[in-house]
Image (spheres, rainbow, N blue to C red):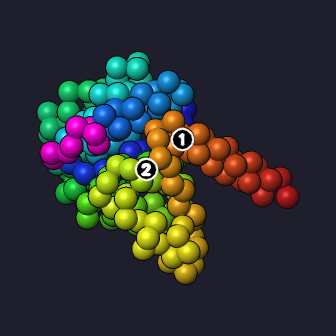
Amino acid sequence: MLRIGVIGQSGSISSEVYSLAEQVGKEIATRGAILLTGGTTGVMEAVSKGAKEAGGLVVGILPGDHPDTANRYVDIPITTGLSFDYRSLILVHSSDALIMVGGENGTLGELSIAYLNCKPVVVIEPSGGWAARLRTVAYEGSYLDTRRTVKLDFAQTACEALDIILARVDQCAKNEGESGSK
């Protein structure tokens, strides 16, 4: 099963961002993918709620050693014994692709990890935070630096984000198949 990670800020978020994140979770679940998040509050809770209510599987990659820090919608809490920033490494490396909803500095760090590891990322621009500003500071509007490691995609809705993610993952699989058969 496809594993889609969602990155975004923890803590208090606006009702608009909460609703958008919930919709992202629902789209992930209805399209048969597994949701991975940092497992705690804010965007992570909202997206987990959406996926859970749509019958999806929700995995929380948690900082620390306590599974009870997971939000109530997490089916599988994975404790890492690590701080937030190191937990993010596990989240990104465990995901086939990622969706960015809003985001502050921690989310920006997760985005950078994804970029350095050639993970497809779709940024939902109307969600605010870094997601709303990223295109204006990105190199050529789509990259984090001149190496052009992996193109960032931008979406306006949860549905559009999932359409892009599924197309990107499918294209990556085709490219790997072609390079493996040579």
The residue positioned 46% from the left and 38% from the top of the image is 158
Could you say whether the residue bearing mark 1 is in a helix, strand or loop?
helix
Could you say whether the residue bearing mark 2 is in a helix, strand or loop?
strand
The residue positioned 56% from the left and 75% from the top of the image is 140
Q: Picture quarter containing residue 129?
A: bottom left
Tell me if residue 181 comes above or below residue 158 in the rendering. below
Tell me if residue 47 comes above or below residue 168 in the rendering. above
Q: Picture quarter containing residue 107?
A: bottom left
Q: Is residue 95 visible?
A: no
Q: Name the residue carrying label 2.
A: 124
The kind of residue on which mark 2 rests is Ile
Residue 108: x and y, percent? 33, 63
Q: Residues within 10 Å of mark 1 (few under 14, many from 20)?
A: some
Residue 144: x and y, percent? 47, 72
Q: Name the residue carrying label 1.
A: 160
Q: Is residue 163 left or right of residue 39?
A: right
Q: Which span of residues is magenta-colored?
A: 11-18
